[in-house]
Every structure is written in C-alpha cells, then in structure tokens.
Amino acid sequence: DSGVTQTPKHLITATGQRVTLRCSPRSGDLSVYWYQQSLDQGLQFLIQYYNGEERAKGNILERFSAQQFPDLHSELNLSSLELGDSALYFCASSPRLAVYTQYFGPGTRLTVL
Amino acid sequence: GIQVEQSPPDLILQEGANSTLRCNFSDSVNNLQWFHQNPWGQLINLFYIPSGTKQNGRLSATTVATERYSLLYISSSQTTDSGVYFCEITQGGSEKLVFGKGTKLTVNP
C-alpha cells in the first residue's frame, strides 16, 4: 500500500458526460501528479500540483482540468468525454517540489461507452 | 520534446536468470526513476536515480547521465518480478515528466 488513495476504482459513463476523479496523497506529501495510461498512448503525464498551485503541465487536453485543495487532496475533472478517454488514470504524490520518489495510487479505470 | 526509449520491449526469462533493462534518453534530465507495474496494474517505485548506482536486494540500477542512459539489473529473477518496467525522466530545464514505453518482463517457473 503506497498510502495514496484514489476514488472511485471504476467508473463507467457515456460520451459527452463529465466525471470527477479524486486523489488523496500520502500524509505530508505536497506534490500531486496525474497520469493517463492507455493501450495506444502508454503512460502520459497530465499535470502536477504543488501545495495548491499548478506546477507543470503535460499532455492534458483542454477538456480536462485539475485542482489541489487546501487539505492537499486533488481532483481531476474530465468533461465532454469521448470514447478515446477510456483509460486508467493514476495519481501520484511526492514529498518535495523536485521529484524525488513518487508514490502511485491504485488508479481509477474509466470506461466511456 | 525529449525521447525516452526502453529496450528490449519484451523479455522472457526462466526463474533464476539475470537480466538488464535499458533506458535511453535524448536530452539532459533532472531526475530519473524506475518503476515496476505488476500484473494487477499497481505502479511501484524501484529507484530514484538521476546519476550513479544504487542497489536494493536483487535489483540494482545505474545511470550515466553524461551518456544519456540508465540500466536496471535484475538478478536471480523470480516469477513475482513479472510485469512491466518503466523508466520516467524529468526533462532538464522543465518539470515535464516523460515515461518510456516500458519493458514487459515474463519470468517463467
């Protein structure tokens, strides 16, 4: 158990809908990262937050947004969902601003029908 | 952007064998990590190794940043080592993280 929790574990929804994925980092970790893993694209970095502020952006679509709250949990919002958004979404946390060691949550499997 | 290439893409071993996995990157990096994704999908950090050599039990890793590669050594492999091994880098001059496509390791009993 990495100490990073993600909810829900599975999510099935329809095209055009909006969903919210939630991540709670390890106790004391200030940095949160979001990743998407799909068969065709592999593991893609989406976005990083540090202590509530956006720190780095990767291949995140404009239909996706994220935020980190004062209690350090983070949410990833996916809107206008398309079939191609079906993937495993991981959250990771690390203690410092610079990446030292990342701890990954179990992931949320999103299926868009 | 920076390219991260892992080799080999697939590797099949008998239990007890040794292996070397490679990660090449096309530009300078600030950080480098190795991960193992087990057959249940969980990603586990193995090493944070932007340079130098580290060892943890049967696993060790070496990064030669000046030559832009990192190696992960697995000795006396066990069936529980099966899964996909990824390297992830943080590109120098930015904080973007990039994963390689991974090496899928299968260890047969």
Image: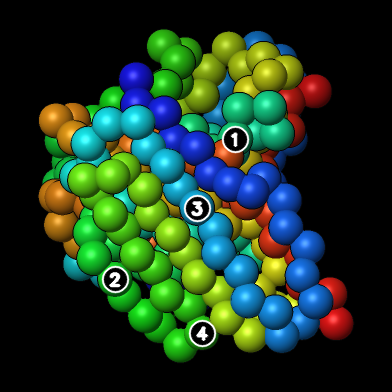
- Mark 2 or mark 4: which comes first in sequence? 2
Q: Which mark is residue B53?
A: 2
Does A90 sit above or below residue B63? above
- The residue to which callout 4 is attached is B58
The amino acid at mark 4 is: Arg
- The residue to which callout 3 is attached is B22
User: Which SS class for mark 4?
Assistant: loop
Q: Chain of mark 4?
A: B
Which quadrant of the rendered structure holds the C terminus of chain B? Answer: bottom right
Q: Nearer the viewer, mark 4 or mark 3?
A: 3
- The residue to which callout 1 is attached is A42
Which quadrant of the rendered structure holds the N terminus of chain B? Answer: top left
Q: Residues under labels 4 and 3: Cα distance?
A: 17 Å
Q: Residues within 10 Å of mark 4 (few under 14, many from 20)?
A: few
Determine the residue positioned at 48% across, 78% down. B59
The amino acid at mark 1 is: Gly
Q: Residues within 10 Å of mark 1 (few under 14, many from 20)?
A: some
